[in-house]
Structure formats: C-alpha cells, structure tokens
Image: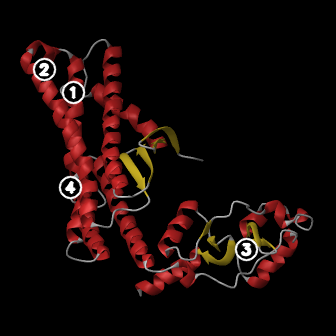
Amino acid sequence: MNSSLKIGSVMGIPIKLHITFVLVLPMFAYIFSINPQPFGFAGVEPPTMRYALSAVASILLFASVLLHELAHSYLAKRYGVKIDSITLFLFGGVSAMEEMPKKPGQEAKMAFAGPLTSIIIGSICVSIHIYLISSNPSLSLNPVYLVFWILGSMNLILGIFNLLPAFPMDGGRVLRSLYARKMSYVKATHRAVSVGKFFAILMAIFGIFVGNLWFPLIALFIYVGASEEEQSTQTDVTLGSIRVKDIMTKNVVSVTPSMTVEDLVQFIFEKKHMGYPVMERDNLKGIVTFTDIEQVPYLERPITLISDIMTTNVISVPSNAQASDAMKLIVSKNIGRVMVVDNELLVGILSRTDLVRTLKLRLE
C-alpha cells in the first residue's frame, strides 16, 4: 500500500503527504490548543476560535517546512540533481534526491539553504509580531496575532536545530562538506556520521534525563539515518568507478514464451538462477522469476505458459552505465536483477547478488 499521497507539484517536484503527517498535524493542533500563551492558545474563547487558530498555526508551520525543503531542492536542481519528490511526514520534510552534490561547496550551499529559509521566515514573522504589538499594545490581547509569534519562533528553532552538526541533518551535511575539502568523500562522510551519532546519543540521554520522549525518538531517527547514509555513500563511491559491463553476466541463459511453467520449474532447478529473460529469437519479450511461478497454482502449471505470467515491462540499463546507478535502480524498484541492453539487443544480465559481491570484494 502506498503510504504517501500526492497533493500537487512545485517547480515540477511532486509534493506528497506521508500517512504520519495525517496523524501529527492534529497532534500539533491539539498541543497548540492546550499550551498557554505565547506558545499556544489555551484560554482563548470561544473554543471554536481556539481550535481554529491552533489548526491554522499547524498548517502554516508545515507549509514553512515545505518551503525549507523547496530551498534545498531549488539549489539541488541548479546543480543538476534530479528531485523525485518532497514528502512531509512525522519529523518534518524530506527531499528525495537521486544523489547529493559531490562537490563540497555545492553540498554546503544546498544544505545551508533550508535552515537559512527557516531562519528568514522566523525572523520576518517575529519582527511583524513585535512591530504590530509595539505600535498598538492593545493588539497583544488579540490571539490572532499570536500566530505570527508561534510561526516565527518555531521556524527559528527549526532553522537553528537543523544547523547542529548532527549528520544527516543539514548542519551535518555542511560539516561533511568541510571535511571533504581535506579528505576523501567516504572518509569525510564517516567523520560526519561519527559526530552525528555522538550528538544523537547525547540527545537521547538528555531526553531520558528530563523525561521527554521526543528527544530519544529524534535521536534514534538521526542515528539510524546517519548509519544508512554512510552505507549508501560508501556503496555509491565504491561502485561509481565500475561499469555494468565489467561485472555483468554475458552468457545469458534465457527461456522462450512458449515454455510451460512446469518446465520452467525444472529449468530453474537445473540452472540454479531465480530469474530469466524471455527471448523470442533475438527479441527480448519480458522477464520471468520464481516469484511469478509462485502465483500459479500447482495443478495449472503444466498448461500455463511463460508468456502468461512474465513481466513485459523490462527494466534495463546500458552496458556502459555505472554499477552504482544500477544498484540505485535495483533498490528503488525492489527487484533482483536488471537486463543489460545495448541498441535494443540483450548483451547481459546484472543481479543484486553481483553488485553486493563486487561491493564486498572492493571493501575488503
């Protein structure tokens, strides 16, 4: 089941709401409704006004989070990075990028753009609130103007918090870009990840000490995110210097569309592979895997043809593609293998196992 819902597009980037956002937005509205001024609307009467202002403050807060992510995405697109989507979820927003800019200066600017946007929004909102109240003190009794203060203060906190050098947060990415000026990208990532994990541990301890479970939860998010980012970077850099043609299987074993599923089962036992291209003469018609076989009842296998169960939408890469790009494709599509096609001709097959084995050999 798709856990995110697309609500529109900005700059050609799909904007999505994660299911956790649907849960957290009412929670934020409730928190604002029970918190006293100046960080909430408790005591505002009638109750409909209190809850309406709380809901407006929550929606505007997440709109500013979206602007934070759009700032990242705008600079990333300028540096030639493709943005697949921006998703708003429990902890804020995430820009899904094909890759991070590898040049230290570009990554630093892109990472800093988000917090800077939040700080600018926060400063403007707080300034408006202060100006309005100072020019007309009676407005301090009007809870509507509290929205400016709440939105401003929350954005300032968001901007400053994201500048903490806790990788993979924005400040951690700025830190990595500084390290990368003096060492390799992989080593710089490792250093930044170590700092990020240290901050995460401190944050968790602080949260437990003060009895606030949000800090350990955020700390866990940072710690896990840092570990995954380090592994992803290591994979990307290690496989980035390898071409698909260097590690693909060239002598491709294929099957025909007219073969029955029962014959295919026996074929799999003999050849020991879990997936095969389906060829008709020199034409690639599709791909069939053991997963496809499992969908066919046992008694129907002798009369069911491969053409009936094969996947015709074949995912392929050219032989001169980088192995790192093939790995990203396999992971994003959650598949076990890709076909290697040059000039509409099948020249090889590359499996997830091939990539993992190559990665292990290069890291040993």
Which of the two residues, 194 or 319, is positioned nearer the viewer here?
Answer: 319
Q: Quadrant of the C terminus?
A: bottom left
Q: Write down the quadrant of residue 137 in the picture.
A: top left
The percent position of residue 115, horizontal first and vertical second, equals 23, 48
How far apart in space, not on screen, are marks 3 and 4 (Cα)?
49 Å
The residue to which callout 4 is attached is: 164
**Which numbered disc flags the more N-terminal residue, 3 or 1?**
1
Q: Which mark is residue 132?
A: 2
The percent position of residue 194, horizontal first and vertical second, equals 26, 69
How far apart in space, not on screen, are marks 2 and 4 (Cα)?
32 Å
Which of the two residues, 48 or 56, is positioned nearer the viewer here?
Answer: 56
Q: Which amino acid type is marked by label 4? A: Leu
User: Left or right: 350 with respect to 346?
Assistant: left
The residue to which callout 3 is attached is: 276
Q: Write down the quadrant of residue 152 in the picture.
A: top left
Query: Is mark 2 in CB contact (under 8 Å) with mark 4?
Result: no
User: What is the secondary structure assignment of the residue under circle 1?
Assistant: helix
**Which numbered disc flags the more N-terminal residue, 1 or 4?**
1
Q: Residues within 10 Å of mark 3 (few under 14, many from 20)?
A: many
**Which numbered disc flags the more N-terminal residue, 2 or 1?**
2
Which of the two residues, 214 or 325, is positioned nearer the viewer here?
Answer: 325
Q: Is residue 256 visible?
A: yes
Query: Is mark 1 in CB contact (under 8 Å) with mark 4?
Result: no
Q: Which amino acid type is marked by label 2? A: Leu
